[in-house]
Amino acid sequence: MALPNPPGLLPAEVAFLCEMEQVTIVPRQRLDRLDLLGGTTRPLIPPQKTTLPLWLAILLKRQRRANIVPPPWLYPESLEEILELETKHFQDSFSLPPTIPPTRQADFAGKSFYATTPFVESCTASATPNALPYHWYEISEMLLEAASDDVAQPDRVRQLLRDLREVRLAKIRKEVETLAGDGEGTRLDGVGAMELSESRGFLTGVIGGLRKIDASREQARRDREEEERENRRDNDDDDDEDDEMT
Amino acid sequence: MSYYDVDAILTDSQKLPCTFELDVPGLGFLEGNVGGTVKAGTKLDLPMWLGIMLAVSTGNTPGSSQLVTLDFPTPLQQRVINALKADPRTVDLRAQAPHFYALGARIMELFDDRAVLDTLLSTFKLRAAEIADQALNPRGALGEGAEFLRGLDETERQLFKAAHEGPKAVRAWTLDLKKNT
């Protein structure tokens, strides 16, 4: 065992990945374009709104050079709506993630490609208001921490986020009942990155435990499948011989 | 299951009731009768690794019966299984066997008993949900959940630890975020 960490991403790593998300800001000072590894940023001209990666936006916010526009789902009204969806309409599954159409982009050589979910903006001011994106928990924590004066009713938002988290964690725990030792999975659509990181140890532990208990039946099933495959191969061989004969 | 897995070794050393079908000379030390013969029909509690080896071996003459027949160990006998069916949460599995599920899985390889296997699976699932609740509840380990947590078997203890570590790491990250600002 080289690395003492459990499998999967640690919360800090999840948060690090989340810092790549684009957010909308309103600059307060002019700033020329920056040549970053992830591409160049647009020059900041107040008061034009523009999008920046979260880490840069938080940096500028701390230096009081910009204000962050929170994504539409981070308003009390939207969170209330999501909470209602979560408790009333999706009692057994998670509320749906935002449907983000893949966008056409050009890479450094000018070749166009389609960017999909993690590389498409889901936390800018134009995001879907009634769906939680993949990085909802980390991004809302970080925004509430660094830019709580930009968020409307931060205390109410905090409370709603806590409620949402509780509801969804309870659902993850309930998923356990649908698991079985035969390798059948469970659906985790719409679960956020941090929630996955949080529950990974437990869920994989349950699946592993069930599989260990069910090992005898699994072995029997494997033997049976192996046998069937053998039989089929034999049959195929017979067919081949028939073909040759005719 | 790894060769060096301590849990697997401990599981294999749990006792299994065996009944000898043949007279075996020289095995008398197993019942404290050194140098003597084990008579057919003797019931002995043997470690699982020995019991299984004896159960799959036959006598010298072809067609002779197996050396020993195995029985369900106490933790898996009907009394316990019935209790698990009634309410999995109230049974103290650790008192039955510290490696209850591992023992169960091992026994299921020998006996094909679907009903017992299904009971074990549903027990594990129901108790896992309870474990997750207790792991997230800060008072659980000390207050009303203490009794239940004492009765967890080894697999469940690891599960409890995993269920406890995840939210703890997220909480630590949130606190870190506040400190660094």
Image: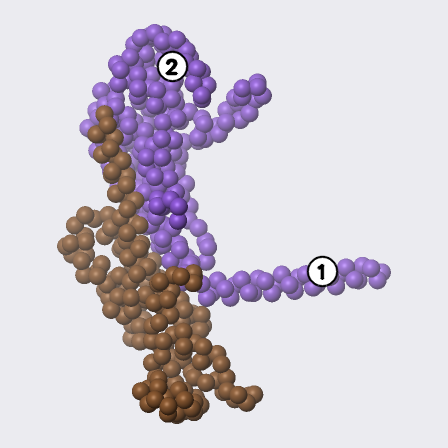
Residue at screen point 34% across, 72% down: B14
- Looking at the rendered image, the quarter that the C terminus of chain A falls into is bottom right
Percent coordinates x, y for residue A22 in the rendering: 39, 23
In whole angstroms, how far apart are the C-alphas of marks 2 and 1? 64 Å
| Residue appearing at x 25%, y 43% in the figure | B168
Name the residue tied to disc 1: A236
Q: Which mark is residue A29?
A: none
Where is B166 relative to B41, above or below?
above
**Mark carried by residue A50:** 2
Residue type, numbered disc 1? Asp
Residue name at image x 53 percent, y 62 percent: A222
Q: Tell me: A13 left or right of A40.
A: left
B85 vs A4, nearest the viewer: A4
Instruction: Tell me which label, 2 or 1, sits earlier in the chain.
Output: 2
Tell me the kind of residue under disc 2: Thr
Q: Which chain is brown?
A: B
Q: As rendered, which of B109 and A140 lies closer to the eye? A: B109
In the image, residue A66 lies at what x, y percent?
A: 30, 14
Chain A palette colour: purple
Picture quarter containing residue A138?
Answer: top left
So how many labels did they put on this image? 2
The x and y percentages for residue B174 are 25, 34
Name the secondary structure under disc 2.
strand
Residue at image location 30% in from the left, 61% down from the top: B154
Label 2 chain ID: A
Q: Is residue B73 left or right of residue A245?
A: left
